[in-house]
Image (cartoon, grey):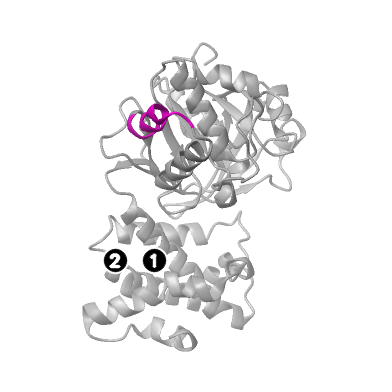
Amino acid sequence: MQQLPETILQFGAGNFLRAFADVFVHLANQEGQNMGRIVVVQSTNSNRAQMLNDKNGHYHVLTRGIENGKKVDTQLKVESISRALIAQKDWAKILELSKSPDLKYVISNVTEVGLALDPNDRHTENAPSSFPAKLLLILKTRFEAQQSGLTILPCELVDRNGDLLLDLIVQQAQQWELDHGLQNWLRQENTWCNCLVDRIVSGLPERHPLLEQDKLLTAAEPYALWAIESPNGLDGFMTHPDIVQTKNVDPYSLRKVRILNGAHTSLVIRAIPMGIQTVREAVERDDLHAWLKELLFEELCPVVENQVEDAKKFATQVLDRFANPFLNHKLSDIALHQETKVQVRLVPTYHEYIEKFGTKPPLLHTILQEYL
């Protein structure tokens, strides 16, 4: 894999991208799809870039959980990262890389908070603070080097994240009074993808034989989905059963919010008063498992099944994901901002069920009494 060129610039060295996008790139390279190698940019004060470079970018990912009703526990050595750079220290190297004809993609996970401008950022030769400003200067350098545009794949958990990132970058370009030709090039010659990502990455396990040699070890559930909205398709992008290219990512968001998140929030209302602490404990109880199954297949799926793909298959996967013996997903964590979550995840399903079937959904009606 060493001979493959550096084609991907990745903002974020955290567990999520290393157990998600970087695994997909590794697998694609192993299969001869030749996606290329990843240069990771670290913007935070952690020592992760140093740790990655000390190991030549290599680390292990454990895949642990339930898939198709069966227990999965495997490990993979991931070798898709070529090097890691620190934004504040290695900014000149990052700008140099941005001129490379080999570079094709930018992947990011800077969290929802990172998709914002910093009013104190100035247009100087140093790295700006905000991620959108950094990306703007990378693209500006590329524009001035007369290189082709890039495909931008934001993985932050924000609706229409590609549209938002483009808006922020154009806004920053206008504030800095940058060339109008650059602003047009940003919009027209780069591909801004709205992405929906879904995978639980639990991070460093407490105990594992690999921990001695690999401090970057991380663990993820078997389920993964990367839905990428690109109206004209991404030529040459890697293929994998868990990567979906679509003309509209919204149905995938709807499916996740109404079925997966809806089931989570329903369990909070039903199980916490019973003294149950985790999602797994809840579904291990026969009565709650039966209740959740009925809720998923009789009330949540029927409302959205004409708007999304594979609603019932997805609901079956949700039951597997909730039963993961390696995860301790606390109901108290899911319960944060409960009022807002109920209004987004469950109340619309309740009203649409009545509209569609002319009767109240019995299970939702019972648990939503205080929210309606």
Q: Residue furthest front?
A: 177
Q: Is residue 185 magenta?
A: yes
User: How far apart are the alpha carbons under marks 1 and 2?
Assistant: 8 Å
Residue placed at 68% from the left, 35% from the top? Answer: 216
Which segment is the magenta one?
A: 178-188
Asked if residue 278 lies left or right of residue 215, the reply is left
Residue placed at 41% from the left, 52% from the top? Answer: 68
Picture layout, residue 91 above or below residue 324: above
**Which image quadrant is residue 369 in?**
bottom left
Q: Position of residue 59 (x, y in %)?
A: 64, 30
- Residue nearest the viewer, comparing 321 with 125: 125
Q: For the residue marked with disc 1, what is the amino acid?
A: Arg
Q: Which mark is residue 304?
A: 2
Q: Position of residue 53 (x, y in %)?
A: 69, 23
Residue placed at 77% from the left, 34% from the top? Answer: 212
Picture layout, residue 6 above or below residue 275: above
**Which image quadrant is residue 302 in?**
bottom left
Residue 334 visible at all: yes
Residue placed at 66% from the left, 20% from the top? Answer: 56
Picture layout, residue 274 above or below residue 52: below
Callout 1 crowding tier (Cα within 10 Å): few <14, some 14–19, many ≥20:
many
Q: How many marks?
A: 2
What kind of secondary structure does the magenta stretch mostly adopt? helix
Q: Is residue 186 magenta?
A: yes
Residue 36 visible at all: no
- The quarter of the image holding the C terminus is bottom left
Q: Position of residue 319 (x, y in %)?
A: 45, 62
- Residue nearest the viewer, comparing 72 with 211: 211
Q: Are marks 1 and 2 in contact (CB under 8 Å)?
A: yes
Q: For the residue marked with disc 2, what is the amino acid?
A: Val
The residue labelled by disc 1 is 258
